[in-house]
Amino acid sequence: MTSSLLPGFKTFRALHHDHTHNHVHVHEEHPAGGTDTRKSGTREIKVVRRVLDANDAMARQNRKLFEEKNVFVLNMMSSPGSGKTTVLEKTLTHVMPNIRSAVIVGDICTTNDADRLAVSGAPVVQINTDEFGGDCHLAAHVIEKALGGIDLAGVDLLIVENIGNLVCPAEFDIGEDTRVVVLSVTEGEDKPAKYPLMFRQCDAALLNKIDLLPYLDYDRQAAIGFIHQVHPGMPIFEISAKTEEGFEHWLEWLKSKVKGKVGLR
């Protein structure tokens, strides 16, 4: 099921899973233990709660394994084009080898991001979802399968680069310790208000591409205000993945999180 493409780099197609998805997503308001009937166009769709229940059960298994192996897991999410992969490239450059790292990369198609991250020397596993409808998020059972390509005994930090999407990935627990969302200044200030679940579910936000601010009509304080309106007190790191401006604060926060669980040497 896996095949080596680069040293330490493996890829596989996501297994098909019956999560009654059909690209209709369960959001926040769920009737306890029941089903929610709602409209989508002209047809009525039943969103079954057991879908998320099954995912949560697998996420608990993943979390137990990560605890046993003493691995800190970061779930990094964003919309496409936020600069998430560049952030991770620079992050891996700074934290390795002191923090032994591995990466799981989710994309519908291509291994472009995994190719870039594999240059760091970290073990990288690519997940592609295109063969089975192009799922727009990584679910817990897919992460469990991908772990077969990583020796967790040699890992302190496992980074999951989720599929680019500001909606679906926030709905699925994968067993992670921390969730971080990347928002670029090219996306508009109001994204946190438009996609509140993502920002509500994350533990920190990276406001990326601040090197472009002189060339944009962008109100950074408005963006920060929208984030804190949705998630009061959320840590926000204003960074440029290109120039690494502001990176020291982000790295300090991440290292403290990893050390808090793993107890680095």
Image: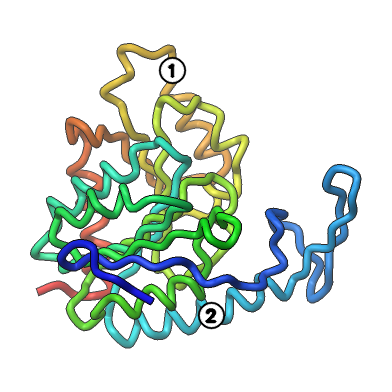
Q: Which residue is disc 1 drawn over?
A: 218
Q: Marks 1 and 2, how far apart in space?
A: 41 Å
Residue 5 is labelled as none
Q: Quadrant of the N terminus?
A: bottom left
Q: Quadrant of residue 190?
A: top right
106 on left or right of 168: left
Q: Quadrant of the C terminus?
A: bottom left
107 on left or right of 170: left
What residue sits 47% from the left and 46% below the top?
164
What residue sits 42% from the left and 85% below the top?
64
Image depth: mark 1 or mark 2 in front: 2
Label 1: few (<14), some or many (≥20) within 10 Å? some
Label 2: few (<14), some or many (≥20) within 10 Å? many
Q: Report the number of numbered marks.
A: 2
Viewer-closest of 79 and 221: 79
Disc 1 residue type? Answer: Tyr
Q: What colouring style does the render use?
A: rainbow
Task: Tell me where residue 237 appears, x and y as whole percent.
Answer: 32, 40
